[in-house]
Each structure stands twice: as structure tokens, then as C-alpha cells.
Image: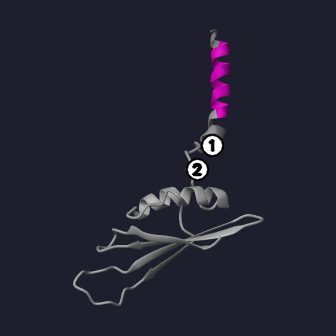
């Protein structure tokens, strides 16, 4: 390659690098995102819910919840309880809407495990 062609190639690459620096590399996205999922996809994902799943596993399966609630158990007992954590997911399409409640229980803080779930509307 002649010095002139080499210089031309370097100038061309130098001109392309700044715009390319602004391009953010695409990250792998989960196919199980609550916000973009259809009702049918949400139903398929919810079938994989299992009692004892961690909050992190549920988030990977269904995405971030739309709403959360923490309820205290006002019951005295010999075993300490952190109460109940409830995550609410909702999906809608032009013809249907669905709301799923996932309830977690924990005996220690930060150790929430799925206790139950139910579809509120379908």
C-alpha cells in the first residue's frame, strides 16, 4: 500500500470513529419482559412460576413488577416472620387484560421466596 493510500485509509477511519463511539453496543434482552410482553406471553411465562422461587428468579421470568406491596403479619408466634411481599404484574392488549399477583414470604430479611400467585383478572 502506498503512503498516500495508507494516509487516506487512516483519515477515513479517523472520520468514522467519533460517530461510532456514540453507538451503544446492543445488549442481550430477555424475551420475558413484563412491559413489552403480550397477555399470551405472560401466561406462558407464568406457567413456569414455582413455589419457593426467589424474587430474582421471578424478575428474570416475568420482568419488573408494575406495583409492589409489603404487608405485615400481626400474629405473634414463636417463628419470626417478615410479613408478605406482593408483586403485581399487569398486561393488556386490544382485546384482553390480565393482572397477576405474586406473593412472597420470608423468615429473614432479603430472603423472599414465592409463596403463592393468582390471576386477579383474566
The residue closer to the viewer here, 27 or 20, is 27
Residue most extreme to the right: 94
Label 2 residue SS: loop
Q: Is residue 44 visible?
A: yes
Task: Mark 1: give few (<14), some (14-19) or many (20+) Cα within 10 Å.
Answer: few
| Residue at x 62%, y 23% (from the top left corner) | 10
Q: Which residue is mark 1?
A: 23
State which quadrant residue 65 falls in. bottom right
- What secondary structure is marked by label 1? loop
By secondary structure, the bulk of the magenta-drawn segment is best described as helix
Disc 1 to disc 2, C-alpha distance: 23 Å
In this rendering, the answer to whether 83 lies above or below 122 is below
Number of numbered discs overlaid on the protein picture:
2
Image location (x, y in percent) of residue 18: 63, 39
Which of the 4 image quarters holds residue 5? top right
Tell me residue 67's x, y (percent). Answer: 55, 74
For marks 1 and 2, give the one nearer the viewer: 2
Please indicate, yes or no, whether residue 33 appears anywhere in the rendered image.
Answer: no
Q: Which mark is residue 31?
A: 2
**Is 116 on the left-hand or right-hand side of 45?**
left
Residue lying at 49% horizontally and 70% vertically, measured from the top left: 117
Give the magenta-colored segment's residue range.
4-16
User: Where residue 60 sits: x, y (%)?
Assistant: 49, 56
The residue carrying pointer 2 sits among few (fewer than 14), some (14 to 19) or many (20 or more) residues within 10 Å by Cα, namely some
Q: Determine the image quadrant of residue 54.
A: bottom left
Amino acid at each position: 500500500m502506498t503512503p498516500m493510500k495508507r494516509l487516506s485509509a487512516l483519515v477515513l477511519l479517523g472520520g468514522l470513529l467519533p460517530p461510532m463511539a456514540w453507538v451503544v453496543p446492543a445488549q442481550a434482552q430477555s424475551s420475558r419482559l413484563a412491559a413489552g410482553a403480550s397477555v399470551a406471553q405472560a401466561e406462558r411465562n407464568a406457567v413456569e412460576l414455582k413455589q419457593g422461587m426467589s424474587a430474582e428468579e421471578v424478575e428474570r421470568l416475568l420482568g419488573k413488577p408494575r406495583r409492589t406491596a409489603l404487608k405485615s403479619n400481626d400474629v405473634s408466634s414463636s417463628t419470626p416472620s417478615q410479613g408478605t411481599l406482593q408483586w403485581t404484574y399487569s398486561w393488556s392488549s386490544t382485546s384482553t387484560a390480565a393482572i397477576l399477583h405474586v406473593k412472597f414470604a420470608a423468615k429473614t430479611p432479603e430472603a423472599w421466596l414465592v409463596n403463592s400467585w393468582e390471576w386477579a383478572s383474566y
